[in-house]
Image: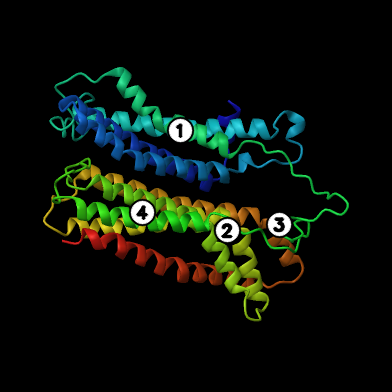
Amino acid sequence: MLALRLARGAHPLVQLRRLLVAAASAGTGFLLLCTLAYAMEHPGAGAVLRLVWCLAPITATVYFAVAVARTDPGTRPRSGLSAVGLGPSRLMVLATISTAVACVLGSMVALLFFLHLRGDVSGLPFDGAAAELLAADRPLPLAGTLTLLSLVPVAASAASAVALRPRPAKATGKEPGSEPADGTDHNDPDAPAPQPGGLPWGVALLAAGLAVETYASRSEAGPRSGGFPMPGGADGSPVGVLAGWALTALGLMLAGPGLTYLCGRLLQSVRPGALRLLAGRVLQEEARRVGRPLGVLCAVASAAYASIVLYAGPRPEAGPLTTLGGLLVAGCAVLTLATASVEARQSRSDTTAALLRLGAPATMLRASAVLRAGALAAVFGPLTWIVAELAALPLAP
């Protein structure tokens, strides 16, 4: 009840983010139910492959749900809450319950819409409009339906609990005569944040993914051999090409924080002024929080470009379910980046207030935000275009 009261009294923007999580959960749940209907009509390996295709929307939805849970004001510890039993562990439980409620709501909407298109629920427009495609002549298995609809709520709740779990406070004191291994004083408030360590692994996985995709596309005997059917009617994507895409996306996600940190370092190079120092230091502090969603967005954009090249040839057009899955992944990637930006702004609210009290003009803070966005676009924009061209080159007709 406490979680429901906190959810009801939240800010409208917080409610909007929760509704977006419910909408993403509804779309993913509908894709899973359509896969179940296909399996009822066509049992075999094809149904399993269609279920594997749903892993991308499921992952994108869970990733977005975790980002929304991290920005929920109810998850931030405040003075006096521990005295009434709302410590970090209890706040984590409340955030997990809120995430579960939003995802369950989306799953219920997906089930109602699915039953409506099958013709099982009447009294609304388009009753039974997709009865033939959704196996309306067969009874819907209750166990399979509940299992598929519970995937997103369970995964999102578990991921939110892991992301928001209380962590022990790090000791700030130093032993007499001890020095950090990297030679920097991490107790100095003016010292920059340490550089993320995933850049080499990200570059390696990115190169491996492009190599696997190129090798797989050339080793296939034809565009339809070894196909991996996409839900909705799009056939003929080799399994190796899809594995290459997955490695490329993982590489960009791992390399994102390191590239964001390097953007901040470049802004502070060559005799920087106050504006570039501020923008660069903020990018270094936010590298881990913003860089990963930014890398995921670059991977989605490059995959979208490669898909356009793929369907430009003599191949079947993308069906409605494939289009829905692509829109879900792209929408969740954009919304996750926007949510991470909100979280970053919340984390530096005290610093911003201190700068304003010291007399820093608000125009300088806005100019710093524009400069940070321009630096990220100057690095990630060409990178996305290069990866998209290299990924689409083996798929060109």
* Alpha carbons under labels 4 and 2: distance apart: 24 Å
From the viewer's perspective, is residue 381 above or below residue 51?
below
* Alpha carbons under labels 1 and 4: distance apart: 26 Å
Mark 3, Cα crowd under 10 Å, few <14 / some 14-19 / many 20+, is few
Q: Report whether 361 appears left or right of 99.
A: right
Residue denoted by label 2: 287
Residue under the image location 29 percent in, 40 percent down:
53
Q: Observer-nearest residue: 99 or 372?
A: 372
Residue denoted by label 1: 155
- Choose mark 3 or mark 1, whichever is in front: 1
Residue under the image location 25 percent in, 51 percent down:
216
**At numbered mark 3, what does the secondary structure look like: helix, strand or loop?**
helix
* Earlier residue among tags 1 and 4: 1
* Earlier residue among tags 3 and 2: 2
**At numbered mark 1, what does the secondary structure look like: helix, strand or loop?**
helix
* Earlier residue among tags 2 and 1: 1
**Which numbered marker is on residue 209?**
4
Residue denoted by label 3: 350
Mark 4, Cα crowd under 10 Å, few <14 / some 14-19 / many 20+, is many
- Check if mark 1's residue and mark 4's residue have beta carbons within 8 Å: no
